[in-house]
Image: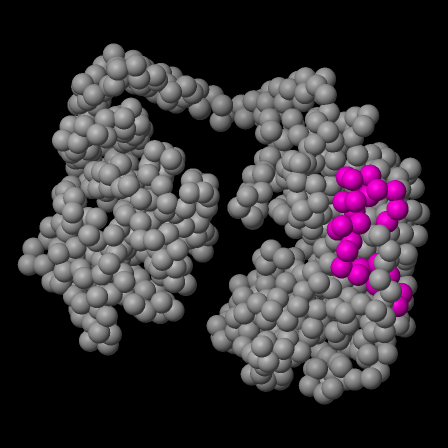
Amino acid sequence: MPRLTLIVPAYNVQGYVRECLDSVLQQDFTDFEVVAVDDCSPDGSGAILDEYAERDARVRVLHLSENVGLGHARNAGIEQATGDYLLFLDSDDTLTPGSLSGIAARLDATGDPDVLVYDYARSFWDGRLLPNQRADALAAGEPAVFPLSERPALLDLLQIVWNKAYRRDFVEAHGFRFPSGYYEDAPWTYSTLVTAERIAVLDRICVLYRQRREGGNILGTVSRKHFDVFDQYERVFTYLDEHPEFNSWRPALFRKMVDQYLTVLERPDRLPKNARSEFFHRAAADYSRRMPEGFERPGGGRGYKYALLGMDSYPALTGVTRANRVRNRARAGSSRRINRAKRAGMRIFYQSQLRLPVDENLAVFSAYWSRGYSCNPAAIDAELARLAPHIRRVWAVRAEHVSRVPKGVEVAVVGSREYWTALARGKYFINNVNFADALVKRTGQIHVQTHHGTPLKTMGLDQADYPASTSMKMEDLLRRCDRWDYSISSNRFSTTVWERVYPCSYTSLETGYPRNDVLINSGAAEVAQARRELGVADGAKVFLYMPTHREYQKEFTPRIDLAKLSEELGPDVTLLVRGHYFYKPTGRLAELQESGRVVDVSGHQTVEQLYLAADALITDYSSAMFDYANLDRPIVIFADDWETYKVVRGSYFDLMAEPPGAVATSQAQLTEILRSDEWRNETSAAFRARFRERFCDFDDGRAAERVVRSVFLREESLLPVTPLAERTPAPSPAQALELVERV
């Protein structure tokens, strides 16, 4: 008897079913069976299922003699199942790697619950992934196993069957089966959840829910079949009638029913126009017939629609709908005026919040112009949680970047009321750039400027001498800098630059960069894990290529022929490439990316993990060299346009005379350096030693702690800095591999 049975119905999915089955059969967990149900598919789906069954004994195929629809196809699969648990997977969706291991482990850890609910993400044809917006309902907590009454928010998840594992004897004991028709998941989902005495959750994305470019979801088809939703909720409430012990769920399921009906009405791709009135009247009849005593309508935009259903007033609904359409067109035609009004409204709201007291235990974080959770602010955030957990930490993030923020981090979307409330009332403000000009610095508020690099290129007021590098007004810049109370410095060199180019009355904190703590504190396991997450083979040589931004280039175009370099370095070398933008690879470069020899890591969230994984850094004028030097690993400078760069942007020292390692001014020279031992020879090490002596003053692994103790805990003296000669940075990949194997 296998641990898991995956039931995979197939109908007209010949273009997707291979990917679906591959995602299952390539899992690292192997104690499962697949019951693939060919629902009399007219395309080649059935033959593909047979092909997989011939190759893998874990796959069994059931060919139905007639098309019975998704629900009954699943029922046929249930009859053939032998596993402890039933999992349902639609044949155009896929499992994520390691998902079955995660599911099995969670089932074991929670003592075989009746139902395990796990997470999913929508997968779009263009490569985008959209996380489940109600993933918060799946957060781990205590107790680990519970009835629905202890976590009713699970009802607000999408009504789907394929994000759950069901204990088979639980299903059989209660006789659960799928009905026919559209919306067949609703009766099954609600009946199983209210019945289950032991539910567990797994906060892990296990299923990628395919969103086809050309459609493919039957619920997105205009048809009278959408009237099936009435039969499905008839089944839901019949089940409640038969089980009065679940009567307490009537209000919640009534709300789910009404919301489902309204969704069908609101979506233009569901009902034929001549059927909308009929559907509304049937929905109104169910509303009046099933409304629980004392039910309170929800507030907000849907509240009035509940009321109109209660009055069975379809003309009123269509009138409101038409009015909304007219209003929407008017809004679209005058978006600028509306946006101005909204901004004015937010300004008024912000002014009102400024009259309220400062919250002494609120810290507001941001990084890289509110693009996510990273850099020095993220490292300070983590340490603050450890040393001063009473302080609430809120991150200002732009709406389009919210998905980049780790779960559990509180977010205030830029421009929202929560954002302006935080700006008005926060005590501490931590950023690696400046906050918005509109922010008013209040008495008692404390601003910490962490910066995001050691300056090789000119910064601040010095950029005025290089007008091609900036269009910034220096007066405006200094007004923003006047808000700073503290300026974080990673070395004495930076301190002298910051205090000159940002001449304002702040205190310099020579703490080191908090983001670099991980480069000192990580051990062999962390280095090995960083490489594993990138898919780098043990023993492979990894070069991280990180060029900087150039003001005279509109887009990032690698100045290195990556395909040629990779071929010349050979199959044992992997190139990690991190740029501001990346182009779509074609030809040989695409093949090299497929093989893992060239990996685009431009979108990787944490650059410090890339540092840990790399044997050496290849850069030009990026401040990455100063951070990476803390690892005491080789650095190679590729400076084919140094003369142009220093004229356009300016520099604080001659990198060619004081490099951190070997220097190449042409690709041929770079290739020769990397193919020989020049990149890591004694000469290169001597350059690096001098560079480290000058620029690695304070990064000893305790920078974040220094910031928190000084700024938040008000300790007067900074923790002493461990001398450079006494520090032990993270081991190199070769050292890490040896240490891990020894363990």
- Residue 310 visible in the shown view: yes
Image quadrant of residue 89? bottom left
Q: Position of residue 356 (x, y in %)?
A: 70, 19
Q: Position of residue 47 (x, y in %)?
A: 17, 69
Which residue is at a point 81% across and 79% down the rendered structure image?
684
Up-down: is 405 above or below 720?
Answer: above
Is residue 572 magenta-colored? no
Give the camera-side residue of 576 and 361.
361
Image quadrant of residue 232? top left
Relative side of 356 to 105, left or right:
right
Up-down: is 740 above or below 394?
Answer: below
- Residue 560 visible in the shown view: no
Image quadrant holding the N terminus, namely bottom left
Give the camera-side residue of 292 and 677.
292
Specify the farthest residue to the left.
65
Which residue is at a point 49% across and 76% down the rendered structure image?
595
Is residue 698 magenta-colored? yes
In this picture, which residue range is highlighted in magenta? 692-718
Which residue is at a point 19% across and 48% down the rendered structure image?
171
Q: Position of residue 21 (x, y in %)?
A: 29, 65
Give the camera-side residue of 45 and 710.
710
